[in-house]
């Protein structure tokens, strides 16, 4: 039976300092196989310890002169992975850096002139750009991780990923991490990985989200706002993410709530990268209790301790609804998802009900 105590002293010390005493179910399955050098297709949802499932064996295995490349769909997720791996590697002497779109490429080029990090985390577009410029040599990459493969494919990154992989050494260990494994992902896995790759997944009851889903019928935007005010007044010391349809909606709603005395910030595509990072930092540390977000801006976010999700606008796609509410109830904790549904959104609600079954009305 795998336990953290079987790892090197430096990694165990780092995990202890992070407060991790025992592996999660997906880590128990994936880490021993990854330590053996197996190629893996790891099927795991956000909140199951998936970053540790690939990050711990990477830090444990990388030898001098070897490097690892981790591709992630969004800059937010790339930064989260970077920070998590820096914690795991804090006593191992490995350098971990993230490269992503939305930040000046000149800064990346200057950094790479001086040294190449041991672990490179990045979004496909920026990594392709750096390799194409000759700034990021690929011959040392002996480990490749594709995190949230399903999201990367949904976002249209397949060509970039295939181009990047074509530049990497064929002798490498490859790990895919994905919440869902449709046939397309299996086809790509067979193309990129060794024939004996293993597909592992953990779907234990203890890690299943426990989310109370509620529907509140509204008859106007003014009524919607009043209901949202009531919900947020009862939030207490908890954290909430409120989803809107457009970036304009997110800006307007945040401005209105700030005027009414709520500690909120908006997260949307118009924000420059530095501002986005500042918003996320304030939300994580609890200075900001409520995040008003669009789906595009919140892709790949992995935030612990979110107690409440509010759909101020109900999405048309049931998959988007499921993805939104999955930001709460992580690691088997309890969470609440409330949807404010106007008459114009009844069709969207019916689509979601067909997929998810009956929902509780208030």
Image: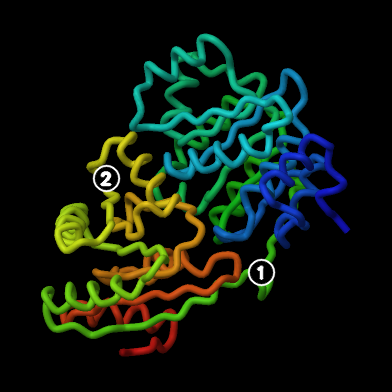
Name the element at disc 2: loop
Q: Position of residue 259 (x, y in %)?
A: 14, 59
Which quadrant of the figure contains the N terminus? bottom right
* Of 314 and 162, the residue lying toward us: 314
Residue 269: mark in rendering: 2
**Taking 177 as reference, is 48 above or below it?**
below
* Of 260 and 253, the residue lying toward us: 260
Sooner in the amino-acid sequence: mark 1 or mark 2: 1
Instruction: Measure the C-alpha gap from mark 1 to mark 2.
Output: 33 Å
Q: Position of residue 68 (x, y in %)?
A: 65, 30
Q: Is residue 198 found left or right of 254 in the rendered image?
A: right
Residue 203: mark in rendering: 1
Which quadrant of the figure contains the C terminus? bottom left
Name the element at disc 1: loop
Report the residue at 83% width, 53% height from top. 3
Residue 53: mark in rendering: none
């Amino acid at each position: 039976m795998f336990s953290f105590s079987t790892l090197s002293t430096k990694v165990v010390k780092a995990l202890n300092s992070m407060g991790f005493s025992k592996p999660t179910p997906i880590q128990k399955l994936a880490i021993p196989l990854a330590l053996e050098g197996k190629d893996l297709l790891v099927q795991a949802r956000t909140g199951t310890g998936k970053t540790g499932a690939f990050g711990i064996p990477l830090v444990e295995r990388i030898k001098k002169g070897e490097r690892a490349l981790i591709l992630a769909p969004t800059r937010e997720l790339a930064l989260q992975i970077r920070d998590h791996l820096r914690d795991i590697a804090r006593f191992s002497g490995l350098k971990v850096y993230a490269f992503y779109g939305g930040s000046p490429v000149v800064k990346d080029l200057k950094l790479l002139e001086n040294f190449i990090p041991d672990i490179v985390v990045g979004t496909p577009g920026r990594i392709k750009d750096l390799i194409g410029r000759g700034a990021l040599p690929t011959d040392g990459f002996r480990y490749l991780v594709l995190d949230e493969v399903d999201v990367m494919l949904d976002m249209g990154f397949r060509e970039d990923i295939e181009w990047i992989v074509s530049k990497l050494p064929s002798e490498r260990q490859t790990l895919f991490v994905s919440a869902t494994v449709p046939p397309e992902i299996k086809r790509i896995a067979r193309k990129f990985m060794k024939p004996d790759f293993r597909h592992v997944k953990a779907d234990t009851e203890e890690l299943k989200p426990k989310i109370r889903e509620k529907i509140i019928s509204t008859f106007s935007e003014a009524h919607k706002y009043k209901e949202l005010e009531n919900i947020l007044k009862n939030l207490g010391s908890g954290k909430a993410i409120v989803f809107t349809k457009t970036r304009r909606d997110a800006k307007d709603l945040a401005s209105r709530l700030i005027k009414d005395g709520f500690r909120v910030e908006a997260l949307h595509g118009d924000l420059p990268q530095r501002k986005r990072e500042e918003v996320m930092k304030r939300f994580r540390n609890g200075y900001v209790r409520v995040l008003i977000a669009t789906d595009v801006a919140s892709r790949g976010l992995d935030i612990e301790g979110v107690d409440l999700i509010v759909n101020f606008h109900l999405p048309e796609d049931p998959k988007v609804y499921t993805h939104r509410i999955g930001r709460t109830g992580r690691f088997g904790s309890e969470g609440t998802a409330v949807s404010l549904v106007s008459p114009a959104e009844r069709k969207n609600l019916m689509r979601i009900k067909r997929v998810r079954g009956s929902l509780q009305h208030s």
